[in-house]
Amino acid sequence: MPRNSNALSPGSVYLRLRNAMENRRNAEYLMKPFTFQPVSFSWVALHPQPKGIIQFIGGAFFGSLPTLCYRHLLRELYDAGYTVVAMPFRFSFRHWGIALSLLEEQRRLQTYLPQLAAEVGYDTEVYHQSDRYAWLGHSLGCKYIALLELLCGVELDPMDTTLDEVIGIRNAQWLRDRLAASPSIWNQPTQLLAPDISDTTSAVPLKSLAHLLDKLGLGVRPTRQQTLALIDRSRLFNLTAMVSFTHDTVAGSIQDPCPATSDVLWLYQHLQAKQLIHAELEGKHLEPLGVKVGHWLVDLNPLDKFAKPLTDWATRKTVLTFFHQLQHRETESETVLEDLKPALAEVRALIGTRSEPGLFSAEPSGLAVDLPETEGQAGARAGAGQ
């Protein structure tokens, strides 16, 4: 009988079977429901049919382990149809640098996510649409999101002198130089959970030491006063929602008597004119944290809820409702952007490509870039003989 020229050799059949099995194992790993995988410097739970991408930034300590500390909240977002990106960060007093690093991370993710989705046969179109990305923060993470919004304003109106007046001309120019190669969060909804506009006194328990660090120019930058001044004078924050909690002694509540010591009350009062969506729920500052154990939400923190029946946990429903409202709200006026385009093009031409690449440290949690040294810092270093 003549030999079939199309027949495969045993070796070829073996190789094909081995490759098919390996591809299937890889696909099964990537397609596991609610499985976080490292992508760039973040953790990503890739949804098969995403209606949007939610980028999450947690609090000062818990934000370094977001996939553990906020696991149930992130799972609920995924189950509601979102690809979830958890962005860990390293503790730093230089909050502008972390915000810039987050912008750079978003630029990387907008390249990596569609590639990853295509590899497993998921829809990729949503990842190419900037307005399908949204931001969710808790505690200190909300300050970084506010800074991202402020940086968006700097990019849209580079001739505005507000930044120079609040943080100084040198620092303002440093930020503008690095914004030339970074994307903005224009038309991306933001949601703040128990926002803590952290200052040095929030990060350092000993007030005398905190005041000394501020006096030497070594404390948190921008300060709470600077951040709130920039928010107050910004034309943005038109796609913002906020969730606060009745017994929050860190971020505050709308029931507090004085906005000078309550971030929630200050934001509630100053963002009302920008159609802020807000709800105040029963709970304390760490209400968004926890893992699901049976029918309970457990955060193992005796100073907070420790354990709470899921039927009493309103955070999930509120967050999802607010994102739905924000994404269907009329987007920020395009006429503002059109008016600013000539000035933006002029400044970009002057700046060129002077931005330095590589805003990240060597590890995923190292999101920090230092601002130029202030006069106080220089004096402190000189006094120390450095």
Image: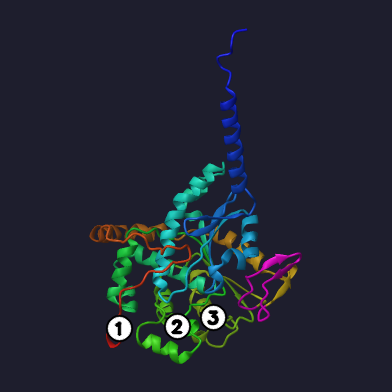
**Residue holding disc 2:** 200
What residue is shown at x 70% (from left), y 71% (from top)? 298
Q: Quadrant of residue 302?
A: bottom right
Is residue 227 on the magenta stretch? Answer: no
Residue furthest to the top in view is 1
The residue mark sitting in front, 3 or 1, is 1
Disc 1 secondary structure class: helix
Residue 263 percent across, percent down from the top left:
52, 80
Residue 381 bears which disc, if any?
A: 1
Front residue of this view, candidates 217 and 83: 217
Q: Residue furthest front?
A: 11
Residue 349: image x %, image y %?
24, 57
Along the viewing direction, whichever of 198 and 253 lies nearer the viewer: 198
Per the image, the residue denoted by label 3 is 265
Q: Residues within 10 Å of mark 2 (few under 14, many from 20)?
A: many
Identity of the residue furthest to the bottom in this view: 208
Q: CA distance from mark 2 to mark 1?
A: 19 Å
Provide the secondary structure element on which disc 2 rests: helix
Magenta range is: 284-304
Disc 1 crowd, CA 10 A, few/some/many (<14, 14-19, 20+): few
Amino acid type at mark 1? Arg
Please state which amino acid type lies under the numbered disc 3: Leu
Q: Are marks 2 and 1 in contact (CB under 8 Å)?
A: no
| CB-based contact (under 8 Å), mark 3 and mark 1 | no
Distance (Cα) linking label 3 and label 2: 20 Å
Label at residue 313 = none
| Residue 296 horizontal side relative to residue 354, left or right | right
Q: Earlier in the sequence, mark 3 or mark 2?
A: 2
Foreground pick, 23 / 223? 23
Q: Position of residue 236 (x, y in %)?
A: 43, 67
Residue 373 versus residue 9 in the image, above or below: below
Quadrant (top left/top right/bottom left/bottom right) for the C terminus: bottom left
